[in-house]
Image (tube, rainbow, N blue to C red):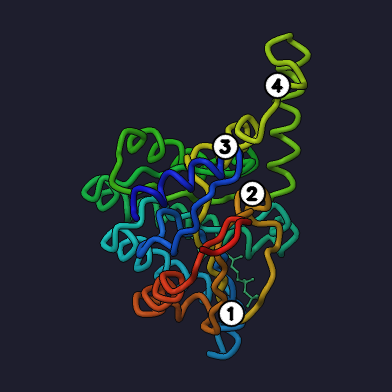
Amino acid sequence: MLHSEVTLHSEVRATSPLPTVVAAARPVPRHVAIIMDGNGRWAKRAGLPRSEGHRAGAESVRAISRHARQLGVQALTLYAFSEQNWGRPAAEVHALFALLVDFLRSEREELHHNQIRLVAIGNTGKLPLPARLALQAVVAETAHYTGMTLALCLSYGGREDMVQATQLLARQVQAGELSPAAISADHISRALWTGRIGCDPDLVIRTSGEQRLSNFLLWDAAYAEFVFCAQDWPDFREQAFSDALQEYANRQRRFGVVAA
Ligand code: FPP
């Protein structure tokens, strides 16, 4: 069952003919992606500034990364800063990137210890220099690890990713390296920033009770299961993550074909 599910997944990513088998969700999803929402509301309820909500949210990032690795998740993608988040007040943006630098400093050793490969997804050239430098260093020194991939989406948007992937492929066509008719779904997957992760998400979780995608993994989540949780992100810890994985395990994934 496990083997057939893995095969099924890669067939879907490559959009070869639709699979003829129907699989229950793998007990542990290979790739979990999370929209970490509700930091501001958590802070407001506690009578704290929004920055304190983000600080508590960073603690959830630490806890969930560790827990995901322990449960055998192979890739964890976190929506940490969207392209649209640049429109937030400068002080909040500054606080978020300060937290990122702090996270990279404090988690560096643990990433090495647990063989976690860090990848940055998005238009990271726009990040403040200290964040960019800290990110580049940890990404480079963990690039060879296979324990788990931790993908941080920073200055990311699903539409923006599709635009840059389209531009990349157009340049290849213009250079005579690719013919328009040869462009496949696999080419697009690989041209996306998210191509660095290596597989589509099996499960997308959103916290804080909101039920929308907000420009997250628009191409990649084509066959993902969705779990929406009531907790705000700072309250989303190990048990909540395990519960979401349990809900996923009870799902039947059909990939567009008919159940047996
Ligand atoms: C959404 O909550 C959260 C964000 C925009 C930022 C997520 C950032 C962190 C969890 C902390 C730092 C990250 C790392 C990787 C160390 P919101 O502010 O939109 O909450 P609201 O909808 O309640 O206002």
The verdict on label 2 being within 8 Å of ligand 1 is no
- Badge 3: residue crowd in 10 Å (few <14, some 14–19, many ≥20): some
Q: Which residue is mark 2?
A: 155
In three-dimensional space, the C-alpha distance between marks 2 and 1, rounded to whole angstroms, equals 21 Å
Q: Nearer the viewer, residue 96 or 209?
A: 209
In three-dimensional space, the C-alpha distance between marks 4 and 1, rounded to whole angstroms, equals 42 Å
* Between marks 2 and 3 in the image, the one whose residue lies nearer the viewer: 3
For label 3, the SS is loop
Instruction: Give the residue drawn at x 34%, y 53%.
Output: 2
Question: Does residue 228 appear left or right of residue 111 in this picture?
Answer: right
Instruction: Give the residue drawn at x 52%, y 62%.
Output: 253
Q: Which residue is mark 1?
A: 208
Question: Does residue 19 appear left or right of residue 178 in this picture?
Answer: left
In three-dimensional space, the C-alpha distance between marks 4 and 2, rounded to whole angstroms, equals 30 Å
Instruction: Residue lying at the far left in this picture: please name it.
Output: 113
Choose the circle earlier in sequence order: 1 or 3. Answer: 3
The verdict on label 1 being within 8 Å of ligand 1 is yes
Choose the circle earlier in sequence order: 4 or 2. Answer: 2
Type of amino acid at the residue the image marks with label 4? Ala
Type of amino acid at the residue the image marks with label 2? Ser
Q: Which residue is mark 3?
A: 14
Choose the circle earlier in sequence order: 4 or 3. Answer: 3
* Between marks 2 and 1 in the image, the one whose residue lies nearer the viewer: 1
For label 4, the SS is helix
Q: Which residue is mark 4?
A: 182
Image location of residue 245, percent across then percent down: 41, 70
